[in-house]
Image (cartoon, rainbow, N blue to C red):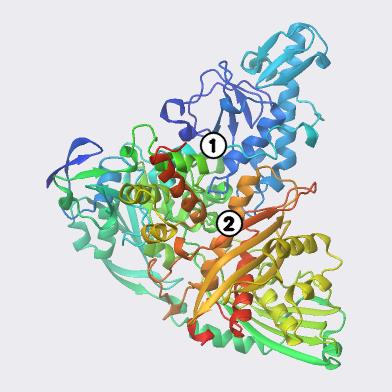
């Protein structure tokens, strides 16, 4: 590892983001020494931690700091944080925040890095005192001579410590020695988020900056044929109007004018080959495909033989629509392009993707591009995309030398998302004479997205002991942009799987929890969350009149969770009263943040269960704003209880853990209440009549 | 046009198009970026400010309409983030991504100013116009009850 003393003010790769500490402290401490890529210490003993993950609400500023500070024995009251630029040490092959990977992916690296820094500081103190390192202990960013009680702050040691060789195998703390890991200190990012000072991408400003908005072709893959900007250019404050291929960009001296003026541009579109797409047409196409054999995704035993010999056969078709991510902060990016450099100030989930998008758009090399990460007003997968960065760089390129912030409206966000794909699954199951499943066949039709296997996860990797199991997939590319949406393939497939399993239990009047228990007998962690959720929810105990329970369980992102939902249904209207969730996510860094993430995922999952989906007509998205894509609101949010299973297993993910489990838990409860099986999301009152 | 209003306790004059929404006057003209853009149609509440004490969606409020009125934004709710709602928000660690929270706090502050001890139903009624995609609603509910206690002088 390269060692150097790092005297930094505000550099391109170290944009200071200590805004939650207040403006006065946002400046980088003078004369700080960089001990390694994550840790630097200033003479006044202020420790600066580089947060290599993007903060989009999931608490990484706090939880990453906890891990580093614990192994470093840093003073928790004297730390500040920054978001660094792209470097391999912050993530390979990509620096980014996705897949609920922060803690589980960085757990070893962060502890190792901080322990190395601590040992370098200890070695420096031992040398100063001329004592063995065993005579030095550390606490609160201070080295202490255990014989003389002499003290040296990390700030006094850091410059020399940074010159030392990096210890290859530092001693890590045992769990019993943790002071911060496993506790819930207050989130470091809260103060700036209650006084309005946190700098989101949307809030970034620099001298001479202009604002852009883009009117995009309403049909995906369409292009600008001709446009007339006469009216738009006549509007006060409009600086330029130009085509960027898939749309027309308007640059103005404020956001409002840019958003108004783009509507005033008269554009003739070449709608391209996708103008015939509609939800109705795609459903029919998917249904037709589901009648034919697909590519094998999983095959064990012999499903056909087992089905032929089954005492009872069940078939069902499940469907889920395209979904938009709809983070509260509409997409935006501020870009300044020159002949030799491209700077981007943006809330991005994947800095490497942003860099590559800028390289592709400008022809510049990676090291001529600087990604300055700002706080994200929600991500949910949307901000891992390259489209909005590429587009903002195209605008910046046209306005060469001038910083331009390209801002999306909510309509732009909903109509030009990279969506969770629509999906259609046909199940066939065979039960034995006692009602236990001996065969399961799933045929999934879902546009391809992400890695191979993404479209089938949640079914292909289901954990139930069913001896004959086949999962097939069809992957029609229909030209609607798709990508990762919080919990990805599990977001729809766990609903399909867990609702259909409920159908199997109900086919012979078996208790849904008991049914799962038997089929999960060899899955101890699944069983444990199922049992804990059932126990905490009082499964099997009487409920007030009109209330019913449903259950679901999943293993995803290295974690396990089960949910029991309590609902009532009145005249087709579903009310979710309570959701109890038991989660096993291995070692927990911050239990309060885990509980927040589980709650968050549940509320996020309620929307597609009960309220919203994207619909298409004439190749266009029909939804326009939150009136036609209406997220879950406070009065629709149940009481949520989170129970964490104590564990010493390696950390699992939490950000995406709970979202898949909510729709099946809720709609299985709706079945208990109504005897109506909802097989298409979102549930509609008509389905329950 | 020149518009003068009282902003966070001080006289403020701006020269903007009269139909420009207050949201963009605050954010782009005056660099008060604590008030957020979420939907532009008063559907999400992220842009909520107080106009003469009433919670108001600044994204559909024309600048000319606030002439002579008192406008309070998150930056002016209290000089040191010590408003009972902000204290309760910190105590409960309400925000996740935080983008909607200025609007949530401004709506909640107007609620507890009008209703000293809001019930859950009062909270539903007042807050259902404020969307939070991180789903912090349960924490918001607890924090509003806590803010009511703090406002009433309870520790």
Whichever of labels 1 and 2 marks the residue nearer the N terminus, that label is 1
Q: Pick the residue in front: A443 or B21.
A: B21
Q: Pick the residue in front: B149 or A634.
A: B149
Residue A261: x and y in percent read 25, 59
Query: Circle 2 marks a residue in which chain?
Result: A
Q: How many marks?
A: 2
Q: Rate crowding at label 2 as few (under 14), some (14 to 19) or many (20 or more) other CA atoms within 10 Å.
A: many
Q: Quadrant of residue A477?
A: bottom right
Q: Element at badge 2?
A: helix
Which residue does the numbered mark 1 point to in the structure image? A188
Can residue A5 be seen here? yes
Which residue does the numbered mark 2 point to in the structure image? A599
Q: Rate crowding at label 1 as few (under 14), some (14 to 19) or many (20 or more) other CA atoms within 10 Å.
A: many
Query: Circle 1 marks a residue in which chain?
Result: A
Q: Nearer the viewer, mark 1 or mark 2?
A: 2
Distance from Cα at disc 1 to Cα at disc 2: 20 Å
**Rendered residue at 61%/25% (across/down):** A40
């Amino acid at each position: 590892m390269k060692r150097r003393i790092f005297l930094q003010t505000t550099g391109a790769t170290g944009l200071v983001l200590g805004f939650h500490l207040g403006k006065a402290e946002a400046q980088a401490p003078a004369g700080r020494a960089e001990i390694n890529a994550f840790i630097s210490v200033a003479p006044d003993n202020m420790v600066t931690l580089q947060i290599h993950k993007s903060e989009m609400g999931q608490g990484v500023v706090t939880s990453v700091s906890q891990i580093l500070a614990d192994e470093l024995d840093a003073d928790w009251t004297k730390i500040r944080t920054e978001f660094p630029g792209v470097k391999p040490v912050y993530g390979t092959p990509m620096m980014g925040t996705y897949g609920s990977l922060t803690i589980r992916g960085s757990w070893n690296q962060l502890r190792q890095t901080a322990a190395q820094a601590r040992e370098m500081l200890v070695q420096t103190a031992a040398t100063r005192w001329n004592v063995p390192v065993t005579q030095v202990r550390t606490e609160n960013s201070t080295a202490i001579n255990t014989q003389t009680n002499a003290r040296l702050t990390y700030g006094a040691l850091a410059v020399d410590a940074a010159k030392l060789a990096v210890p290859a195998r530092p001693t890590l703390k045992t769990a019993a020695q943790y002071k911060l890991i496993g506790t819930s200190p207050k989130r470091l990012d809260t103060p700036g988020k209650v006084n309005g000072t946190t700098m989101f991408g949307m809030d970034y400003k620099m001298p001479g900056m202009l604002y852009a908005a883009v009117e995009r072709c309403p049909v995906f893959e369409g292009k600008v044929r001709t446009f007339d900007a006469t009216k738009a250019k006549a509007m006060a404050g409009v600086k330029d109007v130009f085509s960027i291929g898939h749309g027309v960009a308007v640059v103005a001296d404020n956001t409002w004018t840019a958003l108004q003026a783009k509507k005033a541009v008269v554009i003739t579109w070449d709608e391209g080959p996708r103008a015939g797409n509609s939800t109705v047409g795609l459903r029919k196409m998917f249904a037709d495909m589901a009648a034919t054999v697909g590519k094998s995704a999983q095959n064990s035993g012999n499903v056909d033989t087992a089905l032929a010999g089954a005492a009872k056969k069940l078939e069902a078709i499940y469907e889920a629509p395209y979904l938009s991510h709809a983070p509260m902060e509409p997409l935006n990016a501020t870009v300044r392009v020159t002949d030799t450099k491209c700077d981007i100030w943006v809330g991005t989930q994947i800095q490497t993707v942003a860099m590559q998008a800028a390289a592709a758009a400008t022809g510049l090399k990676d090291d001529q591009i600087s990604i300055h990460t700002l706080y994200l007003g929600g991500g949910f997968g949307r901000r891992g995309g390259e489209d909005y960065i590429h587009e903002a760089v195209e605008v910046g390129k046209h306005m060469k030398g001038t910083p331009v912030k390209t801002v999306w409206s909510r309509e732009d966000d909903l109509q030009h998302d990279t969506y969770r794909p629509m999906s259609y699954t046909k199940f066939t199951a065979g039960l034995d004479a006692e009602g236990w499943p001996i065969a399961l066949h799933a045929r999934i039709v879902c546009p391809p997205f992400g890695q191979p296997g993404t479209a089938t996860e949640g079914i292909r990797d289901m954990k139930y002991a069913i001896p004959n199991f086949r999962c097939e997939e069809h992957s029609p590319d229909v030209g609607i942009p798709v990508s990762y949406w919080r919990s990805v393939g599990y977001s729809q497939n766990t609903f399909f799987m867990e609702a259909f399993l409920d159908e199997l239990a109900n086919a012979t009047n078996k208790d849904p929890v008991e049914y799962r228990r038997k089929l999960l007998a060899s899955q101890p962690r699944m069983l444990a969350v199922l049992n804990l959720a059932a126990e905490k929810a009082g499964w099997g105990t009487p409920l007030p009149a009109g209330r019913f329970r449903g259950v679901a369980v999943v293993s995803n992102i290295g974690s396990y969770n089960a949910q029991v939902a309590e609902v009532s249904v009145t005249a087709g209207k579903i009310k979710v009263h309570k959701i109890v969730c038991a989660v096993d996510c291995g070692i927990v860094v911050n239990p309060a943040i885990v509980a927040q993430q589980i709650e968050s995922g549940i509320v996020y999952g309620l929307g597609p269960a009960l309220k919203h989906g994207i619909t298409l007509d004439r190749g266009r998205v029909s939804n326009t704003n939150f009136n036609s894509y209406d997220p879950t609101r406070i009065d629709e949010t149940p009481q949520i209880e989170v129970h964490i299973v104590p564990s010493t297993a390696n950390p699992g993910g939490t950000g995406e853990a709970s979202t898949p489990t909510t729709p099946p838990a809720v709609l299985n409860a709706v079945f208990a209440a109504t005897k109506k099986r909802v097989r298409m999301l979102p549930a509609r009152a008509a389905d329950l009549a | 046009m020149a518009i003068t209003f009282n902003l966070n306790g001080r006289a403020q004059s701006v020269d903007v198009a009269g139909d420009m929404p207050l949201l963009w006057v605050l954010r782009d003209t005056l660099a008060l970026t604590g008030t957020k853009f979420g939907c532009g149609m008063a559907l999400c509440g992220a842009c909520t400010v107080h106009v003469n004490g009433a919670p108001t969606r600044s994204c559909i409020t024309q600048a000319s309409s606030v002439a002579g009125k008192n406008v309070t934004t998150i930056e002016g709710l209290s000089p040191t983030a010590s408003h009972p709602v902000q204290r309760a928000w910190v105590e409960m660690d309400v925000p996740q991504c935080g983008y909607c929270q200025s609007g949530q706090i401004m709506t909640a502050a107007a609620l507890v100013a009008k209703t000293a001890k809001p019930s859950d139903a009062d909270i539903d009624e007042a807050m259902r116009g404020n969307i939070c995609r991180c789903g912090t609603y349960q924490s918001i509910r607890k924090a509003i009850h806590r803010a009511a206690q703090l406002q009433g002088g309870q520790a």
